[in-house]
Image (tube, helix red, strand yellow):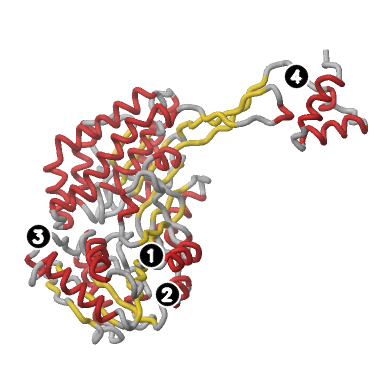
Amino acid sequence: MAEDVGFDSQVAAKMVEELRSGFRTGRTAEYEWRVTQLKGLVRMIDERETEIVDALDKDLKKPKMESFLHEISLVRSSCLMALKQLKQWMKPVKVPSLLAAHPSSSYIVSEPLGIVLVISAWNYPFLLSLEPVVGAIAAGNAVVLKPSEIAPAVSSLFADILPKYVDNSSIKVVEGGVAETTALLEQKWDKILYTGNSRVGRIVMTAAAKHLTPVVLELGGKSPVVVDSISDLKVAANRIAVGKWGCNNGQACIAPDYIITTKSSAPLLVDAFKFALEKFYGKDPQESKDLSRIVNSNHFARLARLLDDDKVSDKVVHGGQRDEKRLFIAPTLLLDVPLDSLVMKEEIFGPLLPIITVEKIEESLDIINAGAKPLSAYLFTKDKKLEENFIKNISAGGILVNDTTLQVASPHLPFGGVGESGMGAYHGKFSFDTFSHKKAVMSRGFGGDLPARYPPYTPQKQKLLRGLLSGSILALISAIIGWPRIE
Protein backbone atom coordinates (compact mmCIF):
# COMPACT_ATOMS: atom_id res chain seq x y z
CA MET A 1 0.00 0.00 0.00
CA ALA A 2 1.02 3.61 -0.43
CA GLU A 3 2.18 5.47 2.65
CA ASP A 4 -0.47 8.18 2.21
CA VAL A 5 -2.78 8.02 5.23
CA GLY A 6 -1.87 10.45 8.00
CA PHE A 7 1.53 10.93 6.45
CA ASP A 8 3.50 13.51 8.41
CA SER A 9 7.12 14.11 9.38
CA GLN A 10 6.99 11.50 12.14
CA VAL A 11 5.63 8.83 9.81
CA ALA A 12 8.17 9.83 7.18
CA ALA A 13 11.02 9.54 9.67
CA LYS A 14 9.90 6.07 10.71
CA MET A 15 9.64 4.95 7.09
CA VAL A 16 13.11 6.26 6.25
CA GLU A 17 14.62 4.55 9.29
CA GLU A 18 13.03 1.25 8.28
CA LEU A 19 14.39 1.66 4.78
CA ARG A 20 17.84 2.48 6.13
CA SER A 21 17.79 -0.54 8.38
CA GLY A 22 16.93 -2.73 5.42
CA PHE A 23 19.64 -1.12 3.32
CA ARG A 24 22.26 -1.78 5.99
CA THR A 25 21.65 -5.53 5.66
CA GLY A 26 23.18 -5.27 2.18
CA ARG A 27 20.17 -6.88 0.53
CA THR A 28 19.59 -4.15 -2.05
CA ALA A 29 23.26 -4.16 -3.07
CA GLU A 30 23.08 -7.79 -4.20
CA TYR A 31 22.97 -8.39 -7.96
CA GLU A 32 20.10 -10.85 -7.62
CA TRP A 33 17.92 -8.33 -5.75
CA ARG A 34 18.48 -5.65 -8.38
CA VAL A 35 17.65 -8.05 -11.21
CA THR A 36 14.49 -9.28 -9.48
CA GLN A 37 13.18 -5.73 -9.07
CA LEU A 38 13.94 -4.76 -12.67
CA LYS A 39 12.25 -7.90 -13.96
CA GLY A 40 9.29 -7.06 -11.76
CA LEU A 41 8.99 -3.65 -13.40
CA VAL A 42 9.06 -5.22 -16.87
CA ARG A 43 6.37 -7.70 -15.82
CA MET A 44 4.27 -4.85 -14.39
CA ILE A 45 4.48 -2.93 -17.67
CA ASP A 46 3.59 -6.01 -19.73
CA GLU A 47 0.67 -7.03 -17.54
CA ARG A 48 -0.72 -3.58 -16.73
CA GLU A 49 -0.21 -1.62 -19.94
CA THR A 50 -3.96 -1.07 -20.45
CA GLU A 51 -4.35 0.33 -16.92
CA ILE A 52 -1.33 2.60 -17.41
CA VAL A 53 -2.73 3.96 -20.70
CA ASP A 54 -6.13 4.50 -19.06
CA ALA A 55 -4.55 6.43 -16.16
CA LEU A 56 -2.62 8.66 -18.57
CA ASP A 57 -5.86 9.28 -20.46
CA LYS A 58 -7.67 10.29 -17.26
CA ASP A 59 -4.95 12.69 -16.19
CA LEU A 60 -3.98 14.23 -19.53
CA LYS A 61 -6.22 12.78 -22.26
CA LYS A 62 -2.90 11.54 -23.58
CA PRO A 63 -3.29 9.65 -26.88
CA LYS A 64 -2.68 5.90 -26.62
CA MET A 65 0.15 5.83 -29.13
CA GLU A 66 1.86 8.79 -27.45
CA SER A 67 1.52 7.07 -24.07
CA PHE A 68 3.19 3.98 -25.44
CA LEU A 69 5.91 5.70 -27.48
CA HIS A 70 6.89 8.45 -25.05
CA GLU A 71 6.34 6.77 -21.69
CA ILE A 72 5.69 3.04 -21.51
CA SER A 73 8.15 1.84 -24.15
CA LEU A 74 10.95 4.07 -22.87
CA VAL A 75 10.67 2.75 -19.32
CA ARG A 76 10.55 -0.83 -20.54
CA SER A 77 13.62 -0.27 -22.71
CA SER A 78 15.48 1.23 -19.76
CA CYS A 79 14.71 -1.83 -17.65
CA LEU A 80 15.86 -4.20 -20.37
CA MET A 81 19.06 -2.25 -20.96
CA ALA A 82 19.85 -2.29 -17.24
CA LEU A 83 19.19 -6.03 -17.05
CA LYS A 84 21.50 -6.65 -20.01
CA GLN A 85 24.32 -4.36 -18.85
CA LEU A 86 24.08 -4.57 -15.05
CA LYS A 87 26.88 -7.08 -14.46
CA GLN A 88 29.23 -4.96 -16.56
CA TRP A 89 28.16 -1.75 -14.83
CA MET A 90 28.77 -3.29 -11.40
CA LYS A 91 32.30 -4.50 -12.18
CA PRO A 92 35.17 -2.52 -10.64
CA VAL A 93 36.87 -0.34 -13.25
CA LYS A 94 40.66 -0.75 -13.30
CA VAL A 95 42.72 2.42 -13.64
CA PRO A 96 46.49 3.03 -13.78
CA SER A 97 48.36 3.26 -10.49
CA LEU A 98 50.92 5.83 -9.47
CA LEU A 99 54.48 5.04 -10.42
CA ALA A 100 55.48 6.12 -6.94
CA ALA A 101 53.13 3.49 -5.48
CA HIS A 102 54.54 0.60 -7.55
CA PRO A 103 53.72 -2.23 -7.16
CA SER A 104 50.00 -1.58 -6.63
CA SER A 105 46.59 -1.89 -8.27
CA SER A 106 43.94 0.82 -8.51
CA TYR A 107 40.27 0.58 -9.38
CA ILE A 108 36.90 2.29 -8.98
CA VAL A 109 34.02 0.54 -7.22
CA SER A 110 30.43 1.61 -7.85
CA GLU A 111 28.56 1.30 -4.57
CA PRO A 112 24.93 2.19 -3.73
CA LEU A 113 24.37 5.59 -2.15
CA GLY A 114 21.69 4.39 0.26
CA ILE A 115 18.15 5.78 0.47
CA VAL A 116 16.99 7.74 -2.57
CA LEU A 117 13.97 10.04 -2.97
CA VAL A 118 12.44 10.54 -6.43
CA ILE A 119 9.94 13.39 -6.75
CA SER A 120 8.20 13.11 -10.10
CA ALA A 121 6.34 15.48 -12.44
CA TRP A 122 2.82 15.42 -13.86
CA ASN A 123 3.44 15.89 -17.58
CA TYR A 124 5.04 12.48 -18.16
CA PRO A 125 3.94 10.90 -14.89
CA PHE A 126 4.82 7.32 -15.78
CA LEU A 127 8.16 7.93 -17.51
CA LEU A 128 9.47 10.58 -15.13
CA SER A 129 8.57 8.46 -12.12
CA LEU A 130 10.03 5.12 -13.17
CA GLU A 131 12.99 6.15 -15.35
CA PRO A 132 15.00 7.42 -12.34
CA VAL A 133 13.68 4.58 -10.17
CA VAL A 134 15.16 2.10 -12.66
CA GLY A 135 18.57 3.74 -12.25
CA ALA A 136 18.29 3.86 -8.47
CA ILE A 137 17.38 0.17 -8.30
CA ALA A 138 20.11 -0.82 -10.76
CA ALA A 139 22.61 0.98 -8.55
CA GLY A 140 21.41 -0.98 -5.50
CA ASN A 141 19.53 1.67 -3.55
CA ALA A 142 16.33 1.68 -1.54
CA VAL A 143 13.86 4.08 -3.13
CA VAL A 144 10.89 6.24 -2.23
CA LEU A 145 8.81 7.47 -5.15
CA LYS A 146 6.65 10.57 -4.72
CA PRO A 147 4.42 10.80 -7.84
CA SER A 148 2.84 14.12 -8.75
CA GLU A 149 -0.55 14.82 -7.21
CA ILE A 150 -1.43 16.79 -10.35
CA ALA A 151 -1.62 13.42 -12.17
CA PRO A 152 -3.78 11.64 -9.56
CA ALA A 153 -4.80 8.64 -11.67
CA VAL A 154 -1.19 7.64 -12.37
CA SER A 155 -0.20 8.37 -8.77
CA SER A 156 -2.99 6.13 -7.47
CA LEU A 157 -2.06 3.42 -9.96
CA PHE A 158 1.54 3.40 -8.73
CA ALA A 159 0.37 3.13 -5.13
CA ASP A 160 -1.85 0.21 -6.05
CA ILE A 161 0.26 -1.91 -8.38
CA LEU A 162 3.96 -1.13 -7.80
CA PRO A 163 4.14 -2.96 -4.43
CA LYS A 164 2.79 -6.08 -6.15
CA TYR A 165 5.78 -6.30 -8.47
CA VAL A 166 8.76 -5.08 -6.42
CA ASP A 167 10.14 -5.44 -2.91
CA ASN A 168 7.83 -3.12 -0.94
CA SER A 169 10.15 -3.17 2.06
CA SER A 170 12.80 -1.30 0.05
CA ILE A 171 10.81 0.42 -2.71
CA LYS A 172 7.89 2.56 -1.55
CA VAL A 173 5.32 4.94 -2.99
CA VAL A 174 4.17 8.02 -1.07
CA GLU A 175 1.12 9.82 -2.43
CA GLY A 176 0.03 13.32 -1.53
CA GLY A 177 0.64 17.00 -2.11
CA VAL A 178 2.63 19.79 -0.50
CA ALA A 179 2.27 18.52 3.08
CA GLU A 180 3.50 15.02 2.26
CA THR A 181 6.34 16.32 0.10
CA THR A 182 7.39 18.69 2.88
CA ALA A 183 7.43 15.80 5.36
CA LEU A 184 9.63 13.82 3.00
CA LEU A 185 12.04 16.72 2.44
CA GLU A 186 12.55 17.10 6.18
CA GLN A 187 14.25 13.68 6.24
CA LYS A 188 17.86 12.82 5.50
CA TRP A 189 18.29 11.18 2.11
CA ASP A 190 21.39 10.00 0.33
CA LYS A 191 20.20 11.57 -2.93
CA ILE A 192 17.13 13.39 -4.19
CA LEU A 193 16.05 13.56 -7.82
CA TYR A 194 13.37 16.15 -8.52
CA THR A 195 11.64 16.85 -11.83
CA GLY A 196 9.58 20.02 -12.13
CA ASN A 197 9.89 23.78 -12.09
CA SER A 198 12.73 25.93 -10.78
CA ARG A 199 10.66 27.45 -7.95
CA VAL A 200 10.10 24.07 -6.31
CA GLY A 201 13.60 23.04 -7.34
CA ARG A 202 14.97 25.77 -5.08
CA ILE A 203 12.81 24.50 -2.21
CA VAL A 204 14.11 20.96 -2.74
CA MET A 205 17.71 22.15 -2.88
CA THR A 206 17.33 24.24 0.27
CA ALA A 207 15.87 21.29 2.18
CA ALA A 208 18.60 18.97 0.90
CA ALA A 209 21.34 21.40 1.94
CA LYS A 210 20.37 21.02 5.60
CA HIS A 211 21.51 17.40 5.41
CA LEU A 212 24.25 17.90 2.79
CA THR A 213 22.20 15.68 0.50
CA PRO A 214 23.23 15.77 -3.18
CA VAL A 215 20.45 16.54 -5.65
CA VAL A 216 19.62 16.04 -9.30
CA LEU A 217 17.28 18.76 -10.52
CA GLU A 218 15.55 18.19 -13.84
CA LEU A 219 13.91 21.54 -14.50
CA GLY A 220 13.20 23.13 -17.87
CA GLY A 221 13.34 26.54 -19.46
CA LYS A 222 12.70 28.07 -22.85
CA SER A 223 14.09 25.62 -25.39
CA PRO A 224 14.78 27.54 -28.62
CA VAL A 225 14.56 26.35 -32.21
CA VAL A 226 16.68 28.15 -34.79
CA VAL A 227 15.53 27.60 -38.38
CA ASP A 228 18.04 28.67 -41.01
CA SER A 229 16.74 29.94 -44.34
CA ILE A 230 18.65 27.26 -46.25
CA SER A 231 17.11 24.37 -44.29
CA ASP A 232 14.32 22.20 -45.66
CA LEU A 233 11.35 24.13 -44.23
CA LYS A 234 8.81 21.39 -44.88
CA VAL A 235 10.85 18.79 -43.01
CA ALA A 236 11.65 21.33 -40.28
CA ALA A 237 7.95 22.16 -39.79
CA ASN A 238 7.01 18.48 -39.56
CA ARG A 239 9.71 17.71 -37.01
CA ILE A 240 9.09 20.81 -34.92
CA ALA A 241 5.33 20.17 -34.95
CA VAL A 242 5.64 16.59 -33.73
CA GLY A 243 8.19 17.68 -31.11
CA LYS A 244 5.90 20.47 -29.90
CA TRP A 245 2.28 19.35 -30.19
CA GLY A 246 3.06 15.64 -30.46
CA CYS A 247 4.75 15.79 -27.06
CA ASN A 248 1.82 16.21 -24.68
CA ASN A 249 0.57 19.24 -26.63
CA GLY A 250 3.64 21.24 -25.69
CA GLN A 251 3.53 20.26 -22.01
CA ALA A 252 7.05 18.86 -22.04
CA CYS A 253 10.28 20.26 -20.65
CA ILE A 254 12.14 19.52 -23.90
CA ALA A 255 9.39 20.75 -26.24
CA PRO A 256 10.29 23.61 -28.58
CA ASP A 257 9.40 26.81 -26.73
CA TYR A 258 9.98 29.41 -29.44
CA ILE A 259 11.42 29.70 -32.93
CA ILE A 260 13.98 32.13 -34.33
CA THR A 261 14.15 32.44 -38.09
CA THR A 262 14.88 35.06 -40.73
CA LYS A 263 12.27 37.57 -41.83
CA SER A 264 12.41 36.18 -45.35
CA SER A 265 11.84 32.59 -44.18
CA ALA A 266 9.09 33.25 -41.63
CA PRO A 267 6.08 33.36 -44.05
CA LEU A 268 7.23 30.17 -45.76
CA LEU A 269 7.75 28.45 -42.41
CA VAL A 270 4.29 29.51 -41.21
CA ASP A 271 2.76 28.06 -44.38
CA ALA A 272 4.67 24.82 -43.84
CA PHE A 273 3.35 24.65 -40.27
CA LYS A 274 -0.24 25.23 -41.38
CA PHE A 275 0.05 22.38 -43.86
CA ALA A 276 1.66 20.04 -41.31
CA LEU A 277 -0.84 20.83 -38.56
CA GLU A 278 -3.85 20.19 -40.77
CA LYS A 279 -2.27 16.98 -42.02
CA PHE A 280 -1.48 15.78 -38.48
CA TYR A 281 -4.56 16.96 -36.56
CA GLY A 282 -7.20 17.77 -39.16
CA LYS A 283 -9.16 20.94 -39.89
CA ASP A 284 -10.64 20.87 -36.37
CA PRO A 285 -7.80 19.88 -34.02
CA GLN A 286 -10.21 19.71 -31.07
CA GLU A 287 -11.62 16.54 -32.62
CA SER A 288 -8.18 14.98 -33.08
CA LYS A 289 -7.43 11.89 -31.03
CA ASP A 290 -3.71 12.64 -31.24
CA LEU A 291 -3.61 15.79 -29.08
CA SER A 292 -3.41 15.86 -25.31
CA ARG A 293 -5.47 18.30 -23.24
CA ILE A 294 -4.20 20.93 -20.81
CA VAL A 295 -3.67 19.23 -17.47
CA ASN A 296 -6.03 21.39 -15.35
CA SER A 297 -7.88 24.70 -15.12
CA ASN A 298 -4.97 26.49 -13.43
CA HIS A 299 -2.62 25.73 -16.29
CA PHE A 300 -5.35 26.60 -18.79
CA ALA A 301 -5.75 30.02 -17.15
CA ARG A 302 -1.98 30.56 -17.18
CA LEU A 303 -1.78 29.84 -20.90
CA ALA A 304 -4.84 32.01 -21.61
CA ARG A 305 -3.10 34.87 -19.79
CA LEU A 306 -0.06 34.51 -22.06
CA LEU A 307 -2.28 34.48 -25.14
CA ASP A 308 -4.33 37.49 -24.01
CA ASP A 309 -1.30 39.69 -23.40
CA ASP A 310 -1.82 42.95 -25.31
CA LYS A 311 1.64 42.61 -26.83
CA VAL A 312 0.77 39.36 -28.64
CA SER A 313 -3.03 39.33 -28.96
CA ASP A 314 -2.74 40.47 -32.58
CA LYS A 315 0.22 38.19 -33.41
CA VAL A 316 -1.72 34.93 -33.79
CA VAL A 317 -1.35 33.66 -37.36
CA HIS A 318 -2.74 30.18 -36.81
CA GLY A 319 -4.86 28.46 -34.15
CA GLY A 320 -5.77 30.24 -30.94
CA GLN A 321 -9.07 28.41 -30.44
CA ARG A 322 -9.79 27.35 -26.89
CA ASP A 323 -12.41 25.50 -24.92
CA GLU A 324 -12.02 25.94 -21.18
CA LYS A 325 -14.63 23.32 -20.35
CA ARG A 326 -12.71 20.68 -22.30
CA LEU A 327 -9.31 22.12 -21.28
CA PHE A 328 -8.37 22.48 -24.92
CA ILE A 329 -6.15 25.05 -26.62
CA ALA A 330 -5.41 24.50 -30.30
CA PRO A 331 -1.87 24.44 -31.68
CA THR A 332 -1.14 28.17 -31.97
CA LEU A 333 1.47 30.08 -33.96
CA LEU A 334 2.37 33.67 -33.06
CA LEU A 335 4.52 35.66 -35.48
CA ASP A 336 6.91 38.51 -34.63
CA VAL A 337 6.28 38.50 -30.91
CA PRO A 338 8.21 41.10 -28.86
CA LEU A 339 10.96 39.78 -26.62
CA ASP A 340 9.40 41.60 -23.64
CA SER A 341 5.99 39.91 -24.02
CA LEU A 342 4.74 37.54 -21.33
CA VAL A 343 5.01 34.55 -23.64
CA MET A 344 8.76 35.19 -23.95
CA LYS A 345 9.38 35.79 -20.26
CA GLU A 346 8.48 32.34 -18.94
CA GLU A 347 8.51 28.74 -20.07
CA ILE A 348 5.30 28.26 -22.07
CA PHE A 349 4.67 24.57 -21.34
CA GLY A 350 1.71 24.41 -23.67
CA PRO A 351 0.55 24.57 -27.31
CA LEU A 352 1.64 28.17 -28.01
CA LEU A 353 4.64 28.61 -30.33
CA PRO A 354 6.03 32.15 -30.82
CA ILE A 355 8.17 32.94 -33.84
CA ILE A 356 10.84 35.65 -33.60
CA THR A 357 12.31 37.04 -36.79
CA VAL A 358 15.83 38.39 -37.40
CA GLU A 359 17.66 39.82 -40.40
CA LYS A 360 20.56 37.40 -40.12
CA ILE A 361 20.31 33.95 -38.55
CA GLU A 362 23.56 34.54 -36.63
CA GLU A 363 21.64 37.05 -34.47
CA SER A 364 19.77 34.11 -32.95
CA LEU A 365 22.76 33.14 -30.82
CA ASP A 366 22.76 36.49 -29.02
CA ILE A 367 19.02 36.23 -28.35
CA ILE A 368 19.39 32.73 -26.87
CA ASN A 369 22.45 33.61 -24.80
CA ALA A 370 20.70 36.68 -23.38
CA GLY A 371 18.37 34.33 -21.49
CA ALA A 372 18.84 31.46 -19.05
CA LYS A 373 20.51 28.28 -20.29
CA PRO A 374 17.79 26.00 -21.72
CA LEU A 375 17.29 22.29 -21.20
CA SER A 376 17.37 21.73 -24.97
CA ALA A 377 18.34 23.77 -28.02
CA TYR A 378 17.46 22.90 -31.60
CA LEU A 379 18.92 23.99 -34.90
CA PHE A 380 17.74 23.33 -38.46
CA THR A 381 20.38 24.08 -41.09
CA LYS A 382 22.48 22.67 -43.92
CA ASP A 383 25.32 25.05 -43.05
CA LYS A 384 28.06 23.11 -41.24
CA LYS A 385 29.77 26.30 -40.06
CA LEU A 386 26.53 27.51 -38.45
CA GLU A 387 26.09 24.09 -36.87
CA GLU A 388 29.60 24.17 -35.41
CA ASN A 389 29.11 27.72 -34.17
CA PHE A 390 25.78 26.82 -32.57
CA ILE A 391 27.17 23.78 -30.76
CA LYS A 392 30.24 25.73 -29.61
CA ASN A 393 28.48 28.87 -28.39
CA ILE A 394 25.08 27.74 -27.08
CA SER A 395 25.15 26.28 -23.58
CA ALA A 396 22.20 23.94 -23.06
CA GLY A 397 21.42 20.63 -21.40
CA GLY A 398 21.40 19.05 -24.85
CA ILE A 399 21.49 20.07 -28.51
CA LEU A 400 19.80 18.39 -31.45
CA VAL A 401 20.48 19.40 -35.04
CA ASN A 402 17.77 19.04 -37.70
CA ASP A 403 15.19 17.46 -35.42
CA THR A 404 13.55 17.92 -32.03
CA THR A 405 13.17 15.92 -28.77
CA LEU A 406 14.75 12.67 -30.06
CA GLN A 407 17.88 13.15 -27.96
CA VAL A 408 15.92 12.33 -24.81
CA ALA A 409 15.12 8.84 -26.14
CA SER A 410 18.78 7.81 -26.48
CA PRO A 411 20.08 5.82 -23.49
CA HIS A 412 23.61 6.60 -24.63
CA LEU A 413 23.23 10.35 -24.06
CA PRO A 414 22.93 12.03 -20.64
CA PHE A 415 19.66 13.82 -20.01
CA GLY A 416 19.95 16.84 -17.75
CA GLY A 417 20.10 20.60 -17.60
CA VAL A 418 22.65 23.28 -16.91
CA GLY A 419 22.24 26.45 -14.88
CA GLU A 420 18.56 27.36 -14.50
CA SER A 421 17.50 24.26 -16.44
CA GLY A 422 18.88 21.91 -13.82
CA MET A 423 21.87 19.97 -12.55
CA GLY A 424 22.92 16.36 -12.82
CA ALA A 425 21.88 13.89 -15.51
CA TYR A 426 20.51 10.40 -15.98
CA HIS A 427 19.28 7.83 -18.59
CA GLY A 428 21.00 4.54 -19.42
CA LYS A 429 24.29 4.04 -17.60
CA PHE A 430 24.19 7.71 -16.58
CA SER A 431 21.28 6.76 -14.30
CA PHE A 432 23.36 4.00 -12.71
CA ASP A 433 26.26 6.40 -12.22
CA THR A 434 24.00 9.14 -10.82
CA PHE A 435 22.79 6.86 -8.05
CA SER A 436 26.21 5.30 -7.32
CA HIS A 437 29.17 6.44 -5.30
CA LYS A 438 32.39 5.97 -7.22
CA LYS A 439 34.68 4.64 -4.52
CA ALA A 440 38.41 4.95 -5.17
CA VAL A 441 40.45 1.88 -4.15
CA MET A 442 44.20 1.33 -4.21
CA SER A 443 45.78 -1.91 -3.00
CA ARG A 444 49.46 -2.55 -2.24
CA GLY A 445 51.50 -5.43 -0.91
CA PHE A 446 54.26 -5.10 1.67
CA GLY A 447 57.12 -5.06 -0.83
CA GLY A 448 58.58 -2.21 -2.81
CA ASP A 449 59.03 0.15 0.12
CA LEU A 450 61.55 2.92 -0.52
CA PRO A 451 63.66 4.60 2.16
CA ALA A 452 63.35 7.89 0.24
CA ARG A 453 59.71 8.05 1.29
CA TYR A 454 60.60 8.45 4.94
CA PRO A 455 62.39 11.21 6.90
CA PRO A 456 64.98 12.47 7.22
CA TYR A 457 64.78 13.88 3.68
CA THR A 458 68.39 14.18 2.56
CA PRO A 459 69.25 15.96 -0.73
CA GLN A 460 69.69 12.56 -2.38
CA LYS A 461 66.23 11.43 -1.20
CA GLN A 462 64.66 14.66 -2.37
CA LYS A 463 66.18 14.24 -5.82
CA LEU A 464 64.86 10.70 -6.05
CA LEU A 465 61.37 11.65 -4.84
CA ARG A 466 61.16 14.49 -7.33
CA GLY A 467 62.05 12.05 -10.09
CA LEU A 468 59.46 9.55 -8.95
CA LEU A 469 56.70 12.13 -8.65
CA SER A 470 57.50 13.41 -12.13
CA GLY A 471 56.90 9.89 -13.48
CA SER A 472 60.54 9.25 -14.38
CA ILE A 473 61.29 5.59 -15.17
CA LEU A 474 65.01 6.24 -14.62
CA ALA A 475 64.27 7.47 -11.12
CA LEU A 476 62.31 4.31 -10.39
CA ILE A 477 65.15 2.12 -11.67
CA SER A 478 67.58 4.14 -9.58
CA ALA A 479 65.34 3.62 -6.56
CA ILE A 480 65.19 -0.13 -7.11
CA ILE A 481 68.89 -0.75 -7.70
CA GLY A 482 70.41 2.10 -5.77
CA TRP A 483 68.61 1.94 -2.47
CA PRO A 484 68.47 -0.94 -0.06
CA ARG A 485 65.03 -2.17 0.92
CA ILE A 486 63.82 -1.19 4.42
CA GLU A 487 63.92 -4.22 6.68
Q: Amino acid at mark 3?
A: Lys
Question: What whole-number distance in Å separates the C-alpha atoms at marks 3 and 1?
Answer: 28 Å
What element does badge 4 sit on? loop
Identify the residue at horizontal 23%, vertical 50% (top origin): 70
Residue at 51% across, 49% down: 210
Residue 250 in sight here: no
Q: List the residue tagged with mark 2.
A: 364
Check disc 3 and report the residue beneath it.
Answer: 289
Residue 431: x percent and y percent? 40, 41
Q: Nearer the viewer, mark 4 or mark 3?
A: 4
Q: Of label 4 and label 2, which has the lower sequence position?
A: 2
* Amino acid at dot 4: Gly
Q: Residue furthest top?
A: 487
**Could you give the CA–CA distance between mark 4 and mark 2, rounded to whole angstroms?**
61 Å
Q: What label sits on residue 448 in the rendered view?
A: 4
- Disc 4 crowd, CA 10 A, few/some/many (<14, 14-19, 20+): some
Quarter of the image with the N terminus in it: top left
Instruction: Indicate which label's residue lies in the foreground, 3 or 2.
Output: 2
- Mark 3–mark 1 contact, CB under 8 Å? no
The residue nearer to you, when weighing 243 against 316, is 243
Q: Secondary structure at mark 2?
A: helix
Spatial CA span between label 1 and label 4:
56 Å
The answer to which of marks 2 and 1 sits earlier in the sequence is 1
Mark 3 or 2 closer to N-term?
A: 3
10 Å crowding of disc 1: few (<14), some (14-19), many (20+): many
